[in-house]
Amino acid sequence: MWESWERYDRWIEELRIRDYVVTHLKYIPAGEVYRFFCASDLVILSYRHFDSQSGVGAIALSFRKPMIVTNVGGLPELVGDHRYIVPPHDPPALAKTIVRCLKDNSRLESMSANADRVAAKFAWPVVAEKTWEVYRKVLNVPQDNK
């Protein structure tokens, strides 16, 4: 559900963080998306409810971006380390995890390396092999001798 940005804009003002927050509240064409990932240090997917997998998370993996996610839907599969999976509806835990990550460049580097490992699990050859395995079982095709 889309909601008004007004409340968040008011918070930005009240917290006096206007100089630190950049918003882009318009459609971003596909050819421009890379700019946002290249400029980011950390991707936060703080959903309260989520039933599937995240397109944003998949793109973040392709850019080797460290991610913090909430423990909903398929989001935890995008993060290789449970320390970066926080409970939904827990802003203090999310804030603590964000600050801990942003204060430690070596942690961010480790999270990027983790993103590489997680991305490898979703690479097309791996997905194709898993898909073939399902068809092989359903069609009762003997397993190849590799």
Image (tube, helix red, strand yellow):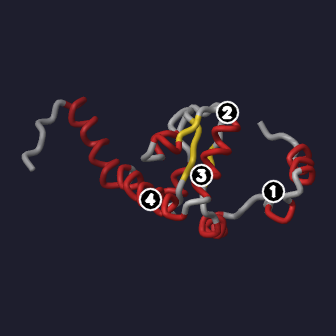
- At label 3, which amino acid type do we have? Arg
- At label 4, which amino acid type do we have? Ser
Q: Is residue 85 above or below residue 30?
A: above
Q: Is residue 134 left or right of residue 78?
A: left
Q: Which-is-in-front pick, marks 2 and 1?
A: 2
Query: Of callouts 3 and 1, which one flags the residue occurring earlier in the amino acid sequence?
Result: 1
The quarter of the rendered structure image containing the N terminus is top right
Which residue matches tag 1?
25
Callout 3 touching callout 1 (CB < 8 Å) = no
Which residue matches tag 3?
100
- Percent position (x, y) of residue 102? 61, 58
- At label 2, which amino acid type do we have? Asp
Marks 3/2: CA distance?
16 Å
Towards the viewer: 84 or 51: 84
Secondary structure under badge 3?
A: helix
Which residue matches tag 2?
90
Q: Which-is-in-front pick, marks 3 and 1?
A: 3
Callout 3 touching callout 2 (CB < 8 Å) = no
Query: Of callouts 4 and 3, which one flags the residue occurring earlier in the amino acid sequence?
Result: 3
Q: Is residue 133 left or right of residue 98?
A: left
Q: Residue at x 26, y 42 (%)?
A: 132
Towards the viewer: 58 or 10: 10
Callout 2 touching callout 4 (CB < 8 Å) = no
